[in-house]
Amino acid sequence: METSLQHKIVYPTGFEKWILIITAISCAILELIDTTVVNVSLREISGNIGATTTEIAWVVTAYAISNVIIIPLTSMLSDLFGRKIYFTASVLIFTFSSLMCGLSTNLWTLVFWRFVQGLGGGGLLSTGQSIIIGAFPPEKIATASAIFGMGIIMGPTFGPALGGFITDNFSWHWIFFINIPIGIIAAVLSWTYVTDMVGAKKPRKIDWWGIIFLVVAIGSIQYVLEEGTSKDWYESSEITFFSITAALGLIAFIWRELAIDYPAVNIRLYKNYNLAMGSLMNFMLGFLLFGTVFIFPLFAQISLGWTATDTGVFMIPSALCSAIAMPIVGKLLGRGTNPKRIIIIGILITFIFLMMLSFASPDSNQNNFYFPFVLRGVGLAFMMSPILSLAVAGLRGRDLAQAIGLANMIRQLGGAVGIALINVFLSHKNADVRGNMLGYISEYSNATSERISAFTQNFISNGFSAGDAEALAHKMMESILFKQQAMVSYTQGFFTVGISILICIPIVFLIRYKKTEKAKIVSDH
C-alpha cells in the first residue's frame, strides 16, 4: 500500500519546484522574523500608544502563545481544508493582521491582532516546511531540511536588525506594513503553485476536546514562560494558577489523544524512538537558537554600549555563515555521512563559540566577536538539518506533516524555556555579583575614595556645584558597577549555556542510525 502510494507521487521539477520552495521558505522566514522584529521597538511602541513597560510585553507574548498553539494543529487543518487552501489562508490571515497591527492605536487592539497574526504565522511555519520536504524525494530529505534550516536560523537573526533599522529611520508601524506587499505576492504564488498532499484525507470527525485541551495546556505553558520572570515566578498567584492549569491541561490532552482514533495531534508518533530523541535535540536547539539571540543583544547594549541597530546588524553575518554551511551539510548527508558525527561536530563548534564569549571583557569590541559568531552560524547549521533528518526518517505523508508540526512546537517551547531560564539565571547572578562587588566599594577603600574624588573634581571643573558634583560622581560609580556586574553575569551566562549544550552529546549517541536505511528508502521509492 505504502509503495503503491509513493509511485503516485509526482515531485515538482524545474521552475515550478523552485518557485514553490521560494514561496514556502519566504513565508517561513517572514513568520520567524515577526517573532523578534518587534522586540527592539517595544520602547517606541509603548510611548506611542501609552502602554507601560509591563503591558507592552503582551505584544510579544500574544504572538508567541498563538504561534505555539497553532503549530501542532497545522497537519489536521491541512487535511481538513486541503493544504493549498490552508496555506494560502494562513498567508492572507498573516498579511491582513499585519495591516491591522500597523493601524492599531491602543495596546489591546494591537495585542489582539498580534494574536491573530500568530495564528496565521504558525500555519506558515510548519506547512511551509512540509511543502519544502514534500518537493523532494525521500533520499533528498537532507537537502530539503538544509533549505528550511536556513530560514529557521535567518528569521530570528534578521528580525532585530530589521526592527532596529525601521524604527530608527521610519516608525514602528512599518515593522508590520512591510509584510503586506510580500504577503500579497506570497498568497498569489501559493494559490498558483501549492498542491494538496497526496493521500491526505479529511478527518471524519474533529477532535474538539483535544484542541481545547491543547490550547489550554500549551497556551498556559507559554504564558508562564513568557511572564514568569516579570511576575517573580511562584511568588505570583497568577503564575501558580496557570502552571496548575498547564499541568492539568497537558494530562487531559495526552489522555484524550491516546484514547480516540481520530486525534487532533497524533502523539502516538512518539512511539518512534528517533522522533522522541529528535524532539529532545530540537528542544535544546530552540534553547540555543533563541537563547543566544536573546542574551547577546542585552550583553552588547548594556555592557558594551552598542545601539539596537548595531547589535542586530552585527548578527547578520552569523546567519549568512549558516546559509553557506547548510548546503555543505546537505551534501555530506547525501553522500551517506553519519548524521550523528555531523551533529556532534556542530555541538562542539557551538560550545567553542560560547566559551569564547565567556571570556569577553569591557574592552571587547565587534572585532572580538566576528569569529565566534562565524562559529555559531556553522555550528547551528551542522546541528539543524541532521537532527530533523534523523527524527523524521521513514515517516511519510500525514505522519511526516504531524512530526514536522510537533518538531516546530518543541523547538519554539525550547526557545521559550531557554529565555525564561536565562532570565532567572541573570537575575540571581546579577544579585550575587553585585553583592560581591559592593564589598570592595566603601568609604574605607582608598581606590574608591580616589575615583569618587576624581569624578567630583571633573564635574566641578565643568561648572557643577560641589553638592551636585558629588552626587553625579556617585551616579558614575553606580553606572560603572552596573556595567561591570552585567559583564560578569552575561559572560558566566554564556559559559553556563555552553556547558549545558554538551548534555546533547549523550542524547546523540542514543539516536539510532543505520547506513543501510538510506538504500532502503531509495528502493522503496
Image (cartoon, rainbow, N blue to C red):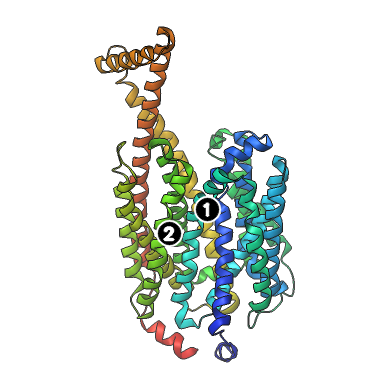
The answer to whether residue 352 is above or below residue 40 is: below
Residue labelled with disc 2: 319
Of all residues shown, which one is farthest toward the left?
A: 446
Distance from disc 2 to disc 1, alpha carbons, whole Å, reads 11 Å
- Residue 410 visible in the shown view: yes
Of residues 284 and 170, which is closer to you in this image? 170
Label 1 sits on residue: 159
Other-residue count near label 1 (Cα within 10 Å), few / some / many at <14 / 14–19 / ≥20: many
| Amino acid carrying mark 1 in the image | Gly
Q: Quadrant of residue 187?
A: bottom right
The residue depicted at 61 percent of the width and 65 percent of the height is 124
Residue 105 vs residue 444, the one in the foreground: 105
Residue drawn where x is 68% and y is 37% of the image: 49
SS at circle 2: helix
Q: Position of residue 229 (x, y in %)?
A: 53, 38
Label 1 residue SS: helix
Dot 2 or dot 1: first in sequence order is 1
* Badge 2 amino acid: Ala
In this rendering, would 96 be left or right of 332? right
Residue 389, percent from left and from top? 45, 72
The front one of 340 and 67 is 67
Q: Residue at x 44, y 75 (%)?
A: 142
Q: Quadrant of the N terminus?
A: bottom right
| Residue 163 versus residue 326 in the image, above or below | above
Judge left or right: residue 458 versus residue 420: left
Q: Position of residue 192 (x, y in %)?
A: 67, 77
Q: Are marks 2 and 1 in contact (CB under 8 Å)?
A: no
Nearer the observer, 525 or 482:
482
Residue sitting at 36 percent across and 13 percent down?
461
